Amino acid sequence: MVVKESLRMYPPIVTPLSREVKEDCEFEGLRFPAGSSVFIPIVHMHYNEKFWPNPKAFDPERFHSSKKKDIHVASFLPFGLGPRNCIGFRFALMEGKIAIARLLQRYCIQMCDLTEEEIKMKAANIALTPESGHIYLRCVHR
Ligand code: HEM
């Protein structure tokens, strides 16, 4: 739940997903001619109040299994969606969870004087990055 909420608020890939329209179609009054490109902005979907009430709040409970049915399939896109989604997403999730578990086995992670209350982010090429270049935290040995 914590990993997913982190990926919602800070999706590592910030460039919009792109898809080519295969045949003329219409969706919610918009016409999409065949051959045109559609860009789906990941970050905007993740902060859309229609899907995520109070989107700026870090709330891992959003991803509790009892609420799974409330999450729109296309509202959470850190690894894209459909037949061309990220082939490495299971590996990336496993690696991330193992890294966090190993870290927390040895250290308590705390805020320190240099920790920003609200981390400002920027897009560097395709990746989301802290604007200052750093996120400062204190690691205390357990
Ligand atoms: C946190 C880590 C990662 C994130 C956030 C991420 C995110 C993404 C996203 C957003 C896409 C585009 C999906 C779409 O258009 O629907 C993608 C595609 C892809 N990712 Fe990842 N990825 C991650 C890790 C990895 C890893 C570890 C691998 C390989 C081991 C990988 C391999 C790929 C490949 C090959 C594609 C292109 C798939 C295709 O076009 O069919 N990714 N990834």
Image (spheres, rainbow, N blue to C red):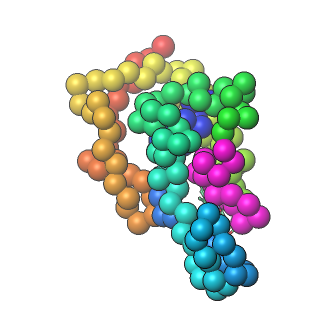
User: Where 91 sits versus 39, above or below?
Assistant: above
Q: Is residue 75 left or right of 66 when viewed as pictured?
A: left
x and y percent of residue 118 in the render? 30, 35
Which is more toward the observer, 111 or 76? 76
User: Where 112 sits versus 26, above or below?
Assistant: above
Quadrant in which the N terminus is drawn: top right
Magenta range = 72-86
Which is more toward the observer, 116 or 52? 52
Give the mark count: 0
Residue at x-position 66% and y-position 72%: 26
Q: Residue furthest top?
A: 142
Residue at x-position 57% and y-position 21%: 105
x and y percent of residue 94 in the render? 68, 40
Residue at x-position 32% and y-position 39%: 119
What predominant SS class does the magenta segment belong to? loop
Which is more toward the observer, 42 or 140? 42
User: Magenta stretch: residue 79 in it?
Assistant: yes
- Residue 17 visible in the displayed image: no
Ligand 1 resides in the quarter of the picture at bottom right
Q: Residue furthest right?
A: 83
x and y percent of residue 71 in the render? 66, 39
Q: Quadrant of residue 137?
A: top left
User: Magenta stretch: residue 31 in it?
Assistant: no
Residue at x-position 68% and y-position 28%: 67
